Amino acid sequence: MLTGLAVAWLIAGLHWYLWRRLVRDTTRHGSRWRIPGAVVLAVGACAMCGAFAVMFGGVDRASWRWLTWPGFLWAALFLYLLLGVLAGEVVRPLLLRGLVLRDAGTTAPAGAGPATAPDAVTAPESTAAATPQPVGAAVGEVPGAGAPPGSAPGPVGSAMGGPEAPAPHGESEAPGRRPISRRMLVSRLAAGATVIAAGAVVGTGTYGVLDGPAVRRVTVPLAKLPARAHGLRIALVSDLHLGPALGRAFCERVVRTVNDTRPDLIAVAGDLADGTAADLRAETEPLAGLSAPLGVYFVPGNHEYFSDADAWLTRVGELGMKVLLNDRVSLPDFDLAGVDDPRGTASGRGPDFAAALDGRDAGRACVLLAHQPVVIHESVAYGVDLQLSGHTHGGQLWPGNLIARLPNPTVAGLELYGGTALYVTRGAGAWGPPVRVAAPSDITVLELASLQGV
């Protein structure tokens, strides 16, 4: 309960911070845009919290897709708006200083005295004492500058959108034409750039997910692989995360993409869905169409354990996949093994390398399926030649790749650990927001290369 309240206060505080930088600092006091700006941010915050509540609440996700989609998209947009505003805290003072120096260099008369401080307001000596100036005058603005001789000084806006003096009696006020302070100009430029950039990043990242995963092709040499198996292709697919945002149509697209690669074997490395097997029967039904001569094999991921792992293992069996739960099969040219996910240790299960690999012929090549790459050190100890994993999503939303590096030895791609090669796919889908930034989704076709006299 306390954790939930702390998270709620944090989200509210960060949205207030966005309102202050994107709305308050870019508008004048009393502007008609301030309330709509606050409403947009408040609705976005509520939708985001609602989307994650649906994900973790154990409700029928299909019925709440109208909430999860906008909520997840706002979560991604919120992230990049926040990053943009934080970057603006560095950029804005530099821009403001540049404007002050530019104006000082172009308007200061020859022989003028020392430059005034950026926020100071100057006035002619003859009127400085007699004419009171409004508090919070704009940076570098001089009342009455450019006005005909003898005219009264005009209103001076606050540096950050504070109260301004009313128009003289009998004159109509035209807020759109009044000069704005340097601070407000810089705030508007920074806010506009932030909103445009965040929208473009999220829009592009969403399109990338919905367009379906790209196919990556990687060649992996295996010293123990016989020459007759040279060129054997394994299609690795992981992390579909079907459920609140990605449904049946997305699953059909993934199946078509996998089958079009014409693999010899298909490896499905967990995290099929976010929800229960019963609720997501329709979304997962297309997976029955996966087909390869050597078969389709599955190992569970951590998200299978977030609902009912046994129900999911039963479901994938119904879809025609063979589950490798701390088990192995001897294929014609190599051994294929699979271990349970470390998440299963909470329920007395988890990876058991001894059960999966003890007693095998060490002279045969061994390929291991494991959802999380963190078990690579056990794979090295047991002489596995190639481990295939997912789980990391490649970080999914930059800078998530930096965070993903903390617990994972490899975030994406192929790396060598001793005599064991580890390949980590970025996954086919997306968790939470259906958005990927600097971590495109993929289905990987690994072509095994023999080193035995090819």
Image: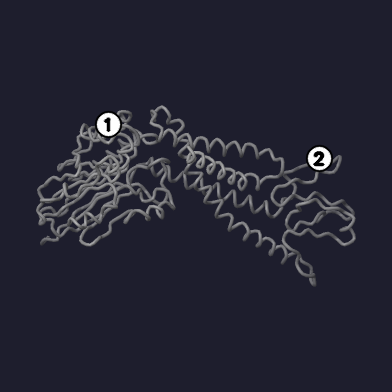
The residue wearing badge 2 is: 172
Which amino acid does the dot numbered 1 rest on?
Answer: Glu
Secondary element under disc 2, as helix, strand or loop, is: loop
Which color scheme does this rendered protein use? one colour
From the viewer's side, name the closer residue of 376 and 367. 376
From the viewer's side, name the closer residue of 208 and 391. 391
- On the image, the x and y values in percent for residue 193 come to 57, 50
Q: Is residue 377 left or right of residue 405?
A: left
Residue at (76% x, 56% y) in the render:
141
Q: Is residue 177 left or right of residue 395?
A: right
Crowd rating for badge 2 (residues with CA inside 10 Å; few <14, some 14–19, many 20+): few
Residue at (74% x, 43% y) in the render:
175
Residue at (18% x, 55% y) in the render:
382
Crowd rating for badge 1 (residues with CA inside 10 Å; few <14, some 14–19, many 20+): some
From the viewer's side, name the closer residue of 189 and 4. 4
In which quadrant is the C terminus drawn? bottom left
The residue wearing badge 1 is: 285
- On the image, the x and y values in percent for residue 447 come to 21, 53
Which amino acid does the dot numbered 2 rest on?
Answer: Ser
**Which quadrant of the view contains residue 314?**
top left
- On the image, the x and y values in percent for residue 387 come to 23, 52
Note whether 243 is above or below 152 in the view shown.
above
Secondary element under disc 1, as helix, strand or loop, is: helix
